[in-house]
């Protein structure tokens, strides 16, 4: 019997790459937000790290929704258009709701002058792009790690 690794579990590479890619994205978009560019360094790092953990939560929820659509938690090893679309749509949907609540209802953060805004929605373009580009990078990286961890 082949020895199993924690990396055989699809959620592990998905969460790992979800963290790494979103962490970089969070720092890249700092200039687009209201108070973060002027915050003390450590406060900005903490803010971006906390946001990244939230992003990983979104990644995992979207991953599990795609798993339901694809009828397998291992969909990422051989992704179909349906599962990729589900992954992206769920992630964008959660992001739109979270951004609206955070900026309009709870006043958790604000957009800076540099943030392009989606007309009619009042939502920043950067977080939406994040949920289109990061998952598309995460899928092949996760697939590669899963394939490397699986015995042949």
Image (cartoon, rainbow, N blue to C red):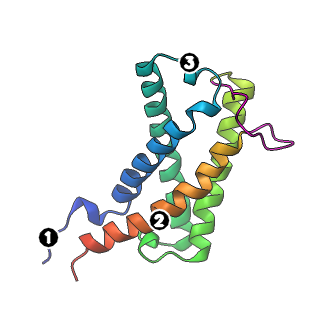
Check if residue 70 falls in the magenta segment: no
Residue 149 x %, y % = 25, 70
Earlier residue among tags 2 and 1 = 1
Q: Residues within 10 Å of mark 3 (few under 14, many from 20)?
A: few
**Residue that carries the numbered disc 2 in the rendered image:** 139
Q: Are marks 3 and 2 in contact (CB under 8 Å)?
A: no
Return the residue found at the far right.
120
Q: Quadrant of residue 99?
A: top right
Q: CA distance from mark 3 to mark 1?
A: 50 Å
Q: CA distance from mark 2 to mark 1?
A: 25 Å
Residue 90 x %, y % = 63, 55
Who is closer to the viewer here, 38 or 96?
38
* Mark number, residue 38: 3
**Residue that carries the numbered disc 1 in the rendered image:** 3
At a point 48% along the width and 26% down the height, the residue shown is: 47
Residue 86 x %, y % = 61, 64
Stretch in magenta: 109-123
Check if residue 118 falls in the magenta segment: yes
Q: Are marks 3 and 1 in contact (CB under 8 Å)?
A: no
Q: How many marks?
A: 3
**Above or below for 136 versus 27:** below
**Above or below for 39 versus 10:** above
* Mark number, residue 130: none
Earlier residue among tags 3 and 2 = 3
Labels 3, 2: front one: 3
At a point 45% along the width and 78% down the height, the residue shown is: 78
At a point 70% along the width and 36% down the height, the residue shown is: 115
Who is closer to the viewer here, 65 or 95?
95
Which image quarter holds the C terminus?
bottom left
């Amino acid at each position: 019997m082949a020895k199993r690794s924690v990396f055989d579990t699809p959620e592990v590479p998905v969460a790992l790459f979800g963290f790494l890619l979103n962490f970089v994205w969070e720092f890249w978009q700092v200039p687009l937000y209201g108070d973060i560019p002027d915050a003390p360094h450590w406060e900005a790092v903490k803010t971006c790290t906390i946001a990244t953990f939230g992003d990983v939560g979104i990644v995992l929820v979207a991953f599990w929704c795609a798993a339901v659509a694809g009828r397998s938690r291992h969909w990422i090893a051989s992704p179909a258009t349906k599962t990729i679309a589900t992954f992206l749509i769920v992630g964008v949907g959660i992001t739109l709701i979270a951004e609206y609540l955070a900026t309009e209802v709870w006043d958790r953060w604000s957009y800076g002058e540099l943030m392009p805004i989606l007309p009619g929605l009042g939502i920043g373009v950067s977080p939406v792009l994040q949920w289109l580009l990061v998952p598309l990078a995460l899928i092949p990286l996760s697939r590669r790690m899963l394939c490397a961890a699986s015995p042949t």
